[in-house]
Amino acid sequence: MEIGSSALLFLLAFTFFFTFGTGQNSNPSPTASSCSDRGNFTAGSAYQANLNTLLSSFSSITANDYGFYNLSVGQTPDQVNAIALCRGDVQPDVCLSCINNATTEITSACPNRKEAAIWYEICMLRYSNRSIVGVLDRSVVVGLVNPSNVTNAESFNGALKNLLVDLMSRASSGGSIRKFATGNVIDPVLQPIYALEQCTPDLSQEDCTTCLETALQEIPRCCGGRRGAQVILTSCFVRFEMERFYQEPTNETTSNSNNNNNTSRIIIAVVVPVASIAIIIVCVYFFLRARKKKEIVESKIRRPSNHF
Ligand SMILES: *[C@@H]1O[C@H](CO)[C@@H](O)[C@H](O)[C@H]1NC(C)=O
Ligand SMILES: *[C@@H]1O[C@H](CO)[C@@H](O)[C@H](O)[C@H]1NC(C)=O
Ligand SMILES: *[C@@H]1O[C@H](CO)[C@@H](O)[C@H](O)[C@H]1NC(C)=O
Ligand SMILES: *[C@@H]1O[C@H](CO)[C@@H](O)[C@H](O)[C@H]1NC(C)=O
Ligand SMILES: *[C@@H]1O[C@H](CO)[C@@H](O)[C@H](O)[C@H]1NC(C)=O
Ligand SMILES: *[C@@H]1O[C@H](CO)[C@@H](O)[C@H](O)[C@H]1NC(C)=O
């Protein structure tokens, strides 16, 4: 009985460690990809060579702290143009790591395409044979929903709409290197809402507004009443959740809700390793005790038989 339960505890601790350990090194899968039908290149073409040069050059560029990159390789008609953008709250080194992962994934997601795009949770990458810098493209790539619904949709949607419209004007007025805004509110029945909006910063303020407006119009259609959703357009992005999913800029004066979130993150960071060590210690203790008991039982059985 005791051997059984300690074995179970061991198994739990092992599973816990295994998931915890591997979770950090895995290469996250893309959120979405879009393979354009504007044409294919042939293997061995100049276009393919330019594309390979362009994609591999991301591994040697210097990180900037606003997370937007535009690169071009070759001459028309074989010129390849690329835009890469990280979510505005991502650290420069993590940003480039995400983009570099995207460069390998984009060619396997969209083999031989003259134009393609890929999105991860924290970065995106597009390339094309046409010029794409400063060009608005508001085609809707995908609307992704959290399958759970909010309890009070009417109250939630009202507060959500106000927040999203506010973030739209803040993001689009962000300037030529950063069009990004986050914010949170609590609706009248105390449901929290956290949201994020971003355009590629090469867009004009007007084009960014147009793009985000299109994204916001999409929300009731794809994602009405849900606790969370992401709407990805080629040139902009909107996401909302009931939990905070983005990092606050370190320099900003933090509100109460942010401090609470930081505290809970620190608590998790401390409690999780401590709990794991405690589980291991408990397991080892039960394991040793169980083994000792077994030895005692065995010697008790053996002793009488030795007497005879
Ligand atoms: C490009 O290739 C894909 C897959 O091989 C094919 O489905 C698509 O029709 C092609 N597009 C054009 C414009 O030829
Ligand atoms: C990129 O891929 C590597 C290896 O698969 C992974 O360890 C790393 O976390 C990925 N980077 C990002 C930012 O997702
Ligand atoms: C891009 O490639 C497509 C397909 O080959 C071609 O129709 C189009 O004219 C090219 N665009 C530019 C700007 O070269
Ligand atoms: C959420 O609401 C949608 C639309 O009203 C419904 O189709 C869906 O089943 C609901 N999901 C859950 C998990 O209740
Ligand atoms: C794109 O890159 C070119 C060449 O490096 C640069 O001159 C231009 O300012 C960049 N555009 C944007 C919007 O960052
Ligand atoms: C923090 O942001 C304020 C404006 O919001 C700015 O004046 C200040 O220089 C920034 N400090 C640092 C260390 O970046």
Image (cartoon, helix red, strand yellow):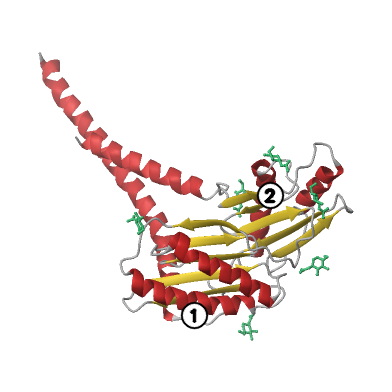
Q: Residue 181 falls in which quadrant of the image?
A: bottom right
Task: Return the residue at label 2.
Answer: 36
Q: Residue 105 falls in which quadrant of the image?
A: top right
Q: How many marks?
A: 2
Up-down: is 193 above or below 306? Answer: below
Residue 66: x %, y % from top left: 68, 69
Up-down: is 24 above or below 136? Answer: above
Q: Residue at x 73, y 50 (%)?
A: 115
Residue 65: x %, y % from top left: 69, 69
What residue type is disc 2 on?
A: Ser
What residue type is disc 1 on?
A: Thr
For mark 1, give the secondary structure.
Answer: loop
Task: Return the residue at label 1.
Answer: 254
Q: Residue at x 81, y 43 (%)?
A: 48
Camera-nearest residue between 85 and 282:
85
Camera-nearest residue between 70 and 172:
172
Closer to us: mark 2 or mark 1? 2
